[in-house]
């Protein structure tokens, strides 16, 4: 059998999932393991400065170029590159052209971290 | 600044890390977050049947094709596809030609799970 397996194991194709939505800065949940969630997000323009009090956050770029601004430097990620932003570290993701990013972080993570504003997505869609 | 950022944040380029080793079925640690480790592994041929008592395990294919045999089905993953094998589920990764795979699992995870044999790597290199 090709594709999805038994025991409820399903494969996830990142490109297929990314084709299901177009909104920017609204992460979608595509997987879960060990209390962490795998999310996909489309980034365009600058996000807000924020940090996560208790959660480390992984950004893996699937398409485009993502800049993660830190208070003292920037990290620029291209496809096939990832970075982990440790808890407590202020950061601001942004992209000049649309970038597609895989996120990995605990289920408890709010997209805007310590900031709650119009860009906060309190409950994420699962696709 | 392009590349590595402040606050100890370093970007990781998967292709660069994969160029640093050639052994099969010997995962290398390339990142860490929230008690989980990000690993890279090269797969060729069949591995052993095993399960992880307490750890869910994510397989994301970077290159090649990975078959994860389950007791009642197979999951076949190509680049840009992932699957999560829940704790307790017996599985056997294999690849007819070399495949490159990103793993995500808790730090406590042993590559051969409940089986300890000549393929067990008790302490993983960090690259």
Image (spheres, coloured by chain):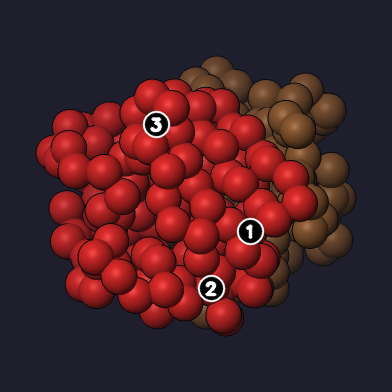
Chain colours: A red, B brown
Disc 1 and disc 3 in contact, CB within 8 angstroms: no
| Residue B104 in sight | no
Same chain assignment for discs 1 and 3: yes
Image mark 3: chain: A
* Residue at image point 19% right, 60% down: A126
Image mark 2: chain: A
- Sequence-wise, the earlier of marks 3 and 2 is 2
Image mark 1: chain: A
Give the class, few, some or many, for how many residues have Cα within 10 Å of label 2's Cα (few <14, many ≥20). Answer: many
* Residue at image point 75% right, 33% down: B1
Q: Check disc 1 and report the residue beneath it.
A: A85
Give the class, few, some or many, for how many residues have Cα within 10 Å of label 1's Cα (few <14, many ≥20). Answer: many
Residue A21 location, quadrant: top left
Q: How many marks can you see?
A: 3
| Vertical order, A56 against A59 (above or below) | below
Give the class, few, some or many, for how many residues have Cα within 10 Å of label 3's Cα (few <14, many ≥20). Answer: many
Q: Check disc 2 and report the residue beneath it.
A: A52
In terms of depth relative to the viewer, which is nearer, B37 or B52? Answer: B37
Circle 3: element type: strand
| Residue A84 in sight | yes
Q: Check disc 3 and report the residue beneath it.
A: A99
| Vertical order, B28 against B64 (above or below) | below
* Residue at image point 26% right, 43% down: A24
Circle 2: element type: loop
Question: Marks 1 and 3, how far apart in space?
Answer: 18 Å
Q: Is residue B14 left or right of residue B5?
A: left
* Residue at image point 76% right, 51% down: A72
Place of residue B58 in the rendered image (x, y in percent of width and height, measured from the top left): 47, 54
């Amino acid at each position: 059998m090709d594709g999805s397996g038994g025991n409820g194991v399903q494969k996830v194709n990142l490109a297929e999932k990314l084709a299901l939505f177009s909104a920017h800065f609204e992460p979608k949940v595509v997987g879960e393991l060990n209390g962490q969630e795998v999310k996909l997000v489309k980034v365009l323009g600058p996000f807000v400065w924020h940090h996560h009090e208790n959660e480390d956050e992984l950004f893996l770029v699937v398409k485009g170029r993502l800049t993660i601004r830190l208070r003292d430097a920037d990290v620029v990620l291209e496809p096939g590159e990832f970075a982990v932003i440790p808890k407590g570290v202020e950061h601001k993701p942004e992209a000049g052209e649309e970038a597609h990013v895989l996120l990995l972080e605990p289920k408890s993570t709010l997209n805007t971290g310590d900031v709650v504003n119009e860009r906060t997505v309190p409950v994420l869609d699962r696709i």
